[in-house]
Image: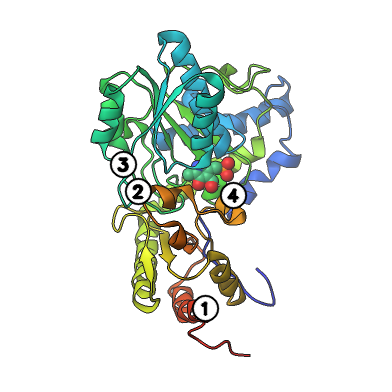
Amino acid sequence: MDRERPTIYMDHSATTPVRPEVLEAMLPYFDVHYGNPSSIHGVGRKAKAGLDDARRTLAEILGARPDEIVFTGCGTEADNAALRGIALARRAQTGASRIVTTPVEHKAVLHTAYDLRDHFGFQLTLVPVDEHGLVDPEDVARALAAGPEVALVSVMYANNEIGTVEPIAEIGALCRERGVPFHTDAVQAAGKLPLQVDPLNVDALSVSAHKFYGPKGVGFLYLRRGTPFHPFITGGSHERGRRAGTENVPGIVGMARALALCESERTQEGTRLRALRDRLIGGILESVEGARLTGHPSRRLDNHASFVISGVEAQGVLMGLDLAGVAASSGSACTSASQRPSHVLEAIGVPPTDAVGGLRLSLGHSNTPEQVEHVLEHLPRIVGQLRGTVPIAL
Ligand code: PLP
């Protein structure tokens, strides 16, 4: 926290701070149990024990088997592994050469799908979404029926920019009926929504630790036993040959601790955040003229409030909020720097003139009702000043 000006952090969808309990769990694996988990000596075995424990903890949370967890370097890598690994293996086994996904996926999925189309000879079908970014499972069924056999379907669990929660279990069920592997990007969902893979009907699921108070640069892919998979990082036989490279033991230990903590608090924290979110949404829609909610009004993440505000640019709003001590985002951390209207807002039909005014406030542990009121006090003034309807106080 800045001593001069305490920050009200409302950008938890971009990343979260590491919790003290998580840091504490990680520390011994830097300098005490620092061994290589592949080594057979005692120091290595200590590291391996930490790795095995973490794998068991994560598998339990997912209702999966420990050998179905493949550790990766981040959520982006988990998405790449799922799309490339499953699509290539399925095509080799069955000749299936089409990928079905949606236009609102994170770029880790969407750009990987484009790469498989442009450089690896796959066909790509993007199923439409409605004005809230919601996928209709019937549209997935239609996409599966139309055209060449499908190698893989990938639909995200919860959207990072607009918070919409997709009907994953229904989509998974119809993929299973047709024998098509189903992947979901659960990077925004992990720690906030149930992750049990059997009721969700998923064959592959991506997670990233830094979204739930774990460290950056570590994630995992759940990969159901028997799912065709061709590793895209080759080398040693780590992770049962599915992802080569010495495992990030401290990061993995921290990730397991972080997800276990979030799981144990999920219902209670979800209820608390939902109340803050709803006050934020209600207050902004009431007090900021030209603001409208993006994403689904009810099927949305408990911590996620997102808007477009007509007649202003996101950059100005974010700078004004920053001056008022509030850290927020225009949508996704990746698109805010590029200043291009987001592909998600485009897919849900927001006109480019409004899409430049995207605002995302994503809540977490540190946020309080007083902080929400602080935002509600300052945002109408910031927007008014940008529009020239409120004088700038000198
Ligand atoms: N998928 C979604 C939905 C995300 O929100 C993000 C991160 O913003 C990622 C994937 C990428 O995760 P990572 O930052 O660990 O690469």
Left or right: 203 in relation to 111: left
The residue positioned farthest toward the bottom in the image shown? 394
Q: Are marks 3 and 1 in contact (CB under 8 Å)?
A: no
- C-alpha distance separating marks 1 and 2: 28 Å
| Disc number lying in front (4 or 2) | 2
- Near-viewer residue (175 or 273): 175
The picture places residue 149, in percent across and down from the top left corner, at 35, 17
Instruction: Write down the residue under mark 2.
Output: 133
SS of the residue at dot 4? Answer: helix
Instruction: Write down the residue under mark 1.
Output: 382
- C-alpha distance separating marks 3 and 2: 7 Å
- C-alpha distance separating marks 4 and 2: 34 Å
Q: Are marks 3 and 4 in contact (CB under 8 Å)?
A: no
Q: Is residue 208 visible?
A: no
Mark 2 CB near ligand 1 (8 Å cut)? no
Q: Which mark is residue 22?
A: 4
SS of the residue at dot 2? Answer: loop
Q: Residue at x 30, y 24 (%)?
A: 144
| Disc number lying in front (3 or 4) | 3
Q: What type is the residue that disc 3 sits on?
A: Val
- Near-viewer residue (64 or 85): 85
SS of the residue at dot 3? Answer: loop
Q: Residue at x 35, y 48 (%)?
A: 133
Precedes in sequence: disc 4 or disc 1: 4
Q: Quadrant of residue 126?
A: top left
Precedes in sequence: disc 3 or disc 4: 4
* Quadrant that contains the C terminus: bottom right
Q: Residue at x 47, y 24 (%)?
A: 68
Q: What type is the residue that disc 4 sits on?
A: Val
Precedes in sequence: disc 1 or disc 2: 2
* Quadrant that contains the N terminus: bottom right
Q: Is residue 279 visible?
A: yes
